[in-house]
Image (cartoon, coloured by chain):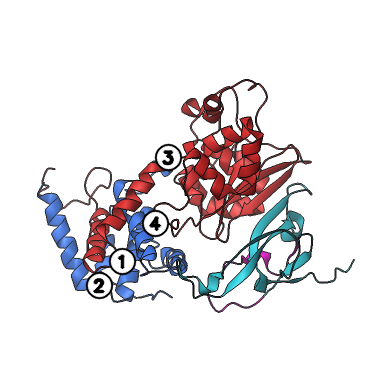
Chain colours: A red, B cyan, C blue
Amino acid sequence: MSRTHDHAPIQESEEISEFEVLETAIRELSISHGLFSAEDHRRFTEWAESIGPAGGSRLVAKAWVDPEFKERLLADGTEACKEVGIDWNNPTGEGTPSDYTFFYVLENTPKVHNVIVCTLCSCYPRPVLGHSPAWYRTPNYRRRMVRRPREVLAEFGLYLPPDVEVRVHDSNQKSRFMVMPMRPEGTEGWSEEQLAAIVTRDTMIGVAVPKVDWTASSAPSEALSSPSRGH
Amino acid sequence: MSKYQVGDRVTVRDAPTMFHTRTQAFTRGRTGVVVEHRPEWVIPEDEAWGRDNGRTERFYVVRFNQRDLWADYTGSDSDTLESEFSERWLMPAKEETK
Amino acid sequence: MSSSNRYDVLMHMLDHIDAQAKPALSDMDREPARWESSMQATCECLTWRGSWSNKDRRQAEDELGETLYAEFPHNSRQALVAAHALLDKGFITQDELSSKMKEVRERFERV
């Protein structure tokens, strides 16, 4: 780390920013005052590093190939998650203060297309989808998804016929939701792994549907299709 | 015994709030239908995560037609919005006049 | 309820921010920086162990983020609001926070 001899404004991307200093100070003071322990904090950072949308993709792929699992998943989302190694009680034993332990999967059908939003604070089903995309947290998305859902979906490239019910779920309380998209045509005989690869994060939020011509690893950049880019 | 059953039409109260609430402004005074029961929880106004000394209440999933929520809704007539409400925020649907 | 106290130790941080260094929209989908994830974990721990309820935290982030800390970069709000809450509640003092930040800064620069 080179010393700077002048006091030019700090560039966040290259040097340690003042906020990084603030974060460290808050954490160390909190620990020294006994507000929580270093072990508590480590548990949360490790948990945060362990989550991602792969868990959600596995749930959907498994539900697509196993009708009895699908029934269990729709009946009790929290419990069914354990079958793919996701425990909503982590990392405290009682869940996280932000995510709770009330998880529901919303099944898309030819007549109903579900999409999730949290107008009040951007809650998101982190244990199954990982961290929310920045666009999900913007006032742009949160305000517009409840008022003009079809416009927002169109910005993501998703158009639904008028006879399909677009059902917006505003997660204003303790429930957390994930969308189970419909399995696309042309995937007959696919393995769970192949199916999971086309179930991307955006399909489980409800702003996209799975496509058979690309996988999660080679999808068009999801950042480009976000409404926050001002298209 | 739950006050409201699945299928009941309910109206969200338009109560003044002296403190933070999780009942969205855009649902106040709006009528929808109960589609599901939720577990009893500590009500948000008493919320202190991990504690058991708050008042608990039944919660309901209410589904609204978007046309009933937004006067200028530009989507389809079949579009809906669902959200969750504690029992104290609901009342039986007002008589609708045609 | 959070106060609208202006804490010098926090407000003075505006002086250290390069006004041009606002993140580009294309940065919006980047992975959180390590310190951002660490801050999130700190907030969860403060709630878990009973110092700051979820309700109060969300409310403070909304209210203070849009008022007192509106001029700060968006990704810094969680840290500012958390510090603000700890100061409001008397868990820490401004002097303590200033000293600790000075110590941390020096420690980082010593590498």
Instruction: Specify whether C70 is left or right of A75.
Output: left
- Which of the two residues, A171 or A61, is positioned nearer the viewer here? A61
Amino acid at dot 2: Ile
- Which residue shows up at 29% across the image and 76% down it? C90
Alpha-carbon distance for marks 1 and 4? 23 Å
How far from the left and from the top, in percent, is residue A118? 56, 55
Badge 4 local density, few (<14 within 10 Å), some, or many (20+)?
A: some
* Pointers 2 and 1 in contact (C-beta within 8 Å): yes
Please, which chain is the residue tagged with disc 1 on? C
- Which residue shows up at 23% across the image and 74% down it? C93
Alpha-carbon distance for marks 4 and 2? 26 Å
How far from the left and from the top, in percent, is residue A180? 62, 40
Element on which disc 4 rests: loop
- Residue position for label 4: A92
Q: Is residue C68 above or below residue A132?
A: below
Magenta region: B15-33
Please, which chain is the residue tagged with disc 2 on? C
- Residue position for label 2: C92
**Considering only order in the chain, which callout, 3 or 2, is on the residue closer to the N terminus?**
3
Instruction: Specify whether C105 is left or right of B32.
Output: left
Amino acid at dot 1: Ala
Whether residue A111 is visible to the viewer of this picture, yes or no, is yes
- Which of the two residues, A214 or A181, is positioned nearer the viewer here? A181
**Residue A19 in which image quadrant:** bottom left
Whether residue A152 is visible to the viewer of this picture, yes or no, is no
